[in-house]
Image: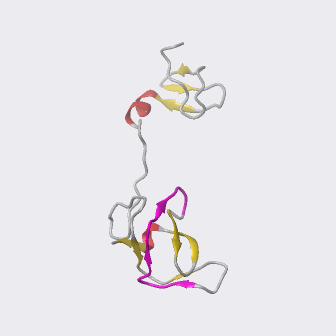
Amino acid sequence: MSSMPNCPKCNSEYTYEDGQLLVCPECAHEWSLEADNENVEDTKVIRDANGNVLSDGDTVTVIKDLKVKGSSLVVKQGTKVKNIRLIDGDHDIDCKIDSLGAMKLKSEFVKKI
């Protein structure tokens, strides 16, 4: 049993081999051993509108006017946003805009400075 890797989803030690796949009986997660070896570190790369890689703490500029959902406010083109934080989800960037407060933005509407 010790030769089988733990489940990557729930970390169960009771995994078993079923043909080409490894299976976890506790959470029913299935994965292949080859894919497990290739994707040891699977990190998502977030890019701006120009294709530059973004990272936490970067400063970006908004490239078009963005309406704020649920209010009459607008984030104007050229607004500078400092110290961004990258998150998972549809809106990639979590930030604080000086005049508007906390906001989530999509990376396709910003460019790195």
Write the residue at 48% across / 15% down: 3
Q: How many marks?
A: 0
Q: Is residue 80 above or below residue 56?
A: below
Split into 4 quadrants, where in the image is the C terminus?
bottom left
Name the side, left or right, on which 14 lies relative to 49: right
In the rendered image, the vertical position of residue 43 relative to residue 67, given as above or below: above
Residue 74 or residue 56, whichever sits in front: 56
Q: Nearer the viewer, residue 17 or 80?
A: 80
Could you tell me what secondary structure mostly forms the magenta stretch?
Answer: loop
The coloring applied to the image is: secondary structure
Q: Position of residue 21 (x, y in %)?
A: 51, 27
Residue 104 image offset from top left, x and y in percent: 55, 68
User: Which residue sits at x=40%, y=72%?
Assistant: 60
The part of the image, by quadrant, that contains residue 45 is bottom left
Quadrant of the rendered image containing residue 55:
bottom left
Image coordinates of residue 89 in percent, x first then y, are: 55, 58
**Magenta region: which residues?**
74-90
Q: Quadrant of the N terminus?
A: top right
Query: Where does the image place residue 50, in percent across and percent down from the top left?
Result: 33, 70
Residue 75 colored in magenta in the image: yes
Q: Residue at x 52, y 78 (%)?
A: 98
Q: Is residue 40 above or below residue 65?
A: above
Q: Residue at x 65, y 82 (%)?
A: 71
Let me know if residue 12 is in the magenta part.
Answer: no
